[in-house]
Image (cartoon, rainbow, N blue to C red):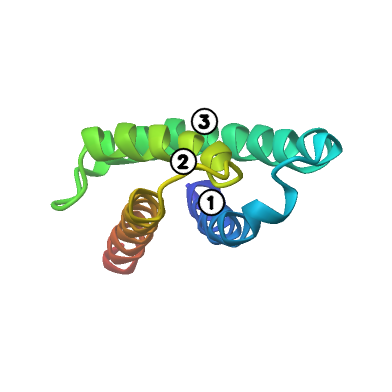
Amino acid sequence: MNRLIDVTEELIEQNEAMFHYYEERMEHAKDRDYFFETVKPFADKVKALADEWFSLASEWVLKEQPVYLHQKQLEDTHENITIASVTCFQPDTKEKRFKEMNQSIHYVLRSLESAWKEKESRG
């Protein structure tokens, strides 16, 4: 299950990168090459990580049943990650909505990481 934490930490980094891309999105709005060189590879990488994370996290939550983490949160977070990995590049993305989604993703990823570490410390 260490892979779950590795993927979770990688998604936390990618979530931070999404925020960075969001802040710079207007600079590249009309650059066609940017889509194929940056947007698509980034979204594909995040999707692959999110899919792996969802599978590992679902299995762990089902087995360990942490108090403050539920399957629906994992499903919503998986969906939000895949949406945010694309909308962070779109110039018409609403700031408030994007920031709230980004914070929500961060919260669930950190909650899972914290719950996992707590279970590990108990043995």
Question: Going 86% across and 37% down the picture, which residue do you hit?
Answer: 33
Q: Amino acid at mark 2?
A: Ile
Question: Going 35% across and 62% down the picture, which residue do you hit?
Answer: 120
In the picture, residue 21 is in which quadrant? bottom right
Residue 105 left/right relative to 8: left
Question: Going 32% across and 54% down the picture, which residue do you hit?
Answer: 100
Q: Element at badge 1?
A: helix
Circle 2 Cα neighbour tier, 10 Å, few/some/many (<14 / 14–19 / ≥20):
many
Q: Amino acid at mark 1?
A: Leu
For this rendering, which residue is in front, 121 or 31?
31
Q: Earlier in the sequence, mark 2 or mark 3?
A: 3
Residue that label 1 marks? 11
Above or below residue 31? Residue 117 is below
Circle 1 Cα neighbour tier, 10 Å, few/some/many (<14 / 14–19 / ≥20):
many
* Real-space Cα separation, disc 2 to disc 3, in angstroms: 10 Å
Residue that label 2 marks? 81
Residue 28 left/right relative to 60: right
Residue that label 3 marks? 51
Q: Element at badge 2?
A: helix
Find residue 5 and report its horizontal and vertical position in percent.
49, 54
